[in-house]
Amino acid sequence: MTRSKLILLALCSIFVLTACNKTETYAELKDKERSAINQFIVDRKIKVISETDFKSNGEVTNVADNEFVLFGSTGVYMQIVEKGCGEKIKKGETANVICRFSERNILADTLQLSNNVMYYSSMPDIMQVINNSGTFTASFTGGLMYSVYGPSVPTGWLVPLSYVNVGRPTEETDDIARVKLIIPAEQGQQYASQSVYPCYYEISFERGI
């Protein structure tokens, strides 16, 4: 099966979910989304911590305890798996960031898209990120997310950039930043937003050239 056909297959599954959702009200869809996220947290034995605890712990999450911090203003949950080498993207800086990811539709309980699999390994996503006085904006310039969803970067993807370093490894002991995210529909990619379904992501961030 060609790469274009596999991308088309992924899109078809999204469109089917969209069509099924048209018979439900937005309030009903939001209730289903909240229930799906809560069940996902239970099933994955996730320990949710507050932003206050996250900050008092030095802006880290305990991976051994499977901690995720909940950002109340957005509904995004984040676990920092690796803080990353190098430095954070500075205020006023524009940087190219190489991303590898897996996207799971929480509502459908399916792996929806990933460039961590061999077939799509040649399609890392490139984000052009701008730090505007602490507020991040970004657009995809290429990659798998770009091919399926277009240039718009899910807002939830930008949350970790305030807390992780985005560098390029120079030593064997250097690790790139890796995070896990639970992203509600309003902070997600365009089809998630339109069809009201949450996604779970595992993402790595590496500074591009």
Image (cartoon, grey):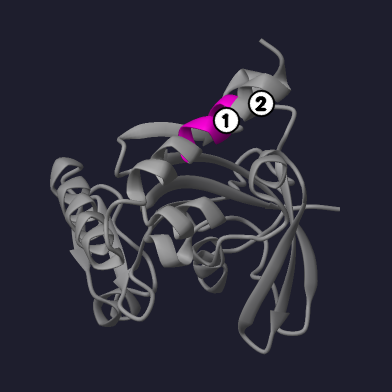
Q: Nearer the viewer, residue 95 or 176?
A: 95
- List x then y, in percent, for residue 119: 65, 19
Q: Quadrant of residue 58?
A: bottom left
- Residue with the most extreme top position: 1
Q: Residues within 10 Å of mark 1 (few under 14, many from 20)?
A: some
Looking at the image, can residue 8 be seen?
A: yes
- List x then y, in percent, for residue 37: 24, 54
Secondary structure mostly seen in the magenta stretch: helix
Magenta stretch? 9-14
Is 13 above or below relative to 150? Answer: above
Which amino acid is tagged 1? Asn
Secondary structure of the residue carrying numbered label 2: helix
Q: Quadrant of residue 125?
A: top right
Secondary structure of the residue carrying numbered label 1: loop
> Do the residues under discs 2 and 1 have CB atoms within 8 angstroms?
yes
For disc 2, the marked residue is 120
Which amino acid is tagged 2? Tyr
Is 196 above or below relative to 39? Answer: below
Spatial CA span between label 2 and label 1: 7 Å
For disc 1, the marked residue is 116
Q: Nearer the viewer, residue 1 or 180?
A: 1
